[in-house]
Structures are given as structure tokens and as C-alpha cells.
Amino acid sequence: MGHDGRRHTRRHLLAADHTRHKPTYIMNPANDNSRIKDASRKVADKVLRSDSLIFTFLRSVVSSQAASWSDMIVRMVMFAFVLQSVDPFYRSNISVACGALVGGIVNCTINYRFTFHAAGQSVKAVIVKYALVWTGSLLLNMYGTTFTCEALSRWQFLNDIGFTPDGIFAASTLAVSLLVSWFWNFALQRYFVYRPSAFDPWAIRIVDAFTFKHKNN
């Protein structure tokens, strides 16, 4: 056997030896399912329990949606069934007010337990602070939408491309509501409403004053 033949035989033997000692990986569906379940459990735990900005914001979106649907359902029930015999002006206003009240209660409750994990904070203080932020949000949405709509209505370019007054109002409402939701509602709820603050003792006194609760001397 020549030199080239011996070299070819040696390479063949080395390749055979490598193949013989190469580890064999066997797929185990049970282990794969277990890993998937563990990963899913970790993600779910982060979504539900993490206080990071991103996951807290995602939970706040869920809370806002629940509040919006509660508001809409109560509003429609009051308008369509409960207040049928009431004057149309008061019928509409009362329906909107009842829906907003129920939606606010739902949002505040879900945020307290689920969104911001505020269990242990004074409920009285949370109620007062939430009411203040909610009132500010209402005013910002009302006047912000009005001013934005008036400003956009003067922009001739929007009229030239076919924007109607209703379209301008809808765009103004959407833009203002998003800005207020992110930079007012979420920010103040995360860092003020559902967190201890120097305002808490004053908020508790306000609730006690309205409920006529006084300490016994």
C-alpha cells in the first residue's frame, strides 16, 4: 500500500472513531413541554407582578379598558332603560355621570389591587388622590380637546385635504386623550395616587371630615 493509501485509510479510521464517540441527542417531548411551561410561567409572573414601567403600563391599559367598558355599559343601560321618562338633557347628562362614576370606581379598584400593587396603602388617601387626578384629567380632556380643535380648524391645509369638522374633532379628541392618558393619568397614578406621599394625612382628614368620623378624646 502506498503512502496515499495509508493516509486515506487513517482518515477513514479517524472519521469512524469520531462518529462512534459522537453523543446522540434524543428529543424528549416531556422536557420540552416542561421548559415551555416554565418560560410561560416566568413571563406571566413578570406581567402580573413586575413593577417595571413597561409591565405596569400594560396592566394600566387592561384596567383602562375594563373601566371604559363598564362606563359604556352603565351609560347605555341608564339612557336606554332607567331614564326613559326623564327630560333628554338631564337623561344624557345623568347617564354620562353614572357611567363615569362606575368607570372611575372600577379603574381605581383594579389599579389598587392589580396595576400598581398598592395593597397596604391607605384606601382613604388613595380615593382622594384618585379623585383629584381624575378631575384634572377631565378638565384637561375637555379644554385640551376644545383648544386643539379650534387651532386645527384654523389650519387651512386640513380643510384643503378634506378634513370635516367632525374629523378634526375626532383627531383632537384622540390626540389629547392619548397625551393626557400617558403624561397625566399614568404618571400621577404611578408616582402619586398609589404611593405614600406627604399629602396622605391631609387626604385622610378630608375623608374623615366628609364622613363625620372624629377621634374620641
Image (tube, rainbow, N blue to C red):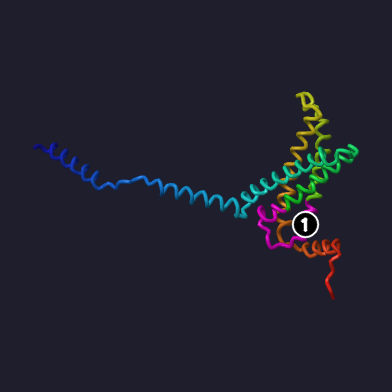
Q: Is 118 a magenta residue?
A: yes
Question: In the figure, 28 relative to 194: above or below?
Answer: above
Left or right: where 64 falls relative to 216: left
Query: Which residues make up the magenta segment?
Result: 109-133
Q: Where the N terminus falls, by quadrant? A: top left
Question: In the figure, 125 relative to 21: above or below?
Answer: below
> Callout 1, which amino acid?
Ile
Q: Which residue is mark 1?
A: 127
Dominant secondary-structure state across the stretch colored magenta: helix
Res 201 visible? yes
Given residues 121 and 139, the one toward you in this image is 121
Res 143 visible? no
Question: What residue sits 84% from the left and 66% below the top?
Answer: 213
Percent position (x, y) of residue 203? 80, 61
Question: What residue sits 72% from the left and 53% below the top?
Answer: 109
Percent position (x, y) of residue 134? 78, 50
- 10 Å crowding of disc 1: few (<14), some (14-19), many (20+): some
Question: In the figure, 111 relative to 202: above or below?
Answer: above
Q: Secondary structure at mark 1?
A: helix
Percent position (x, y) of residue 217? 85, 76
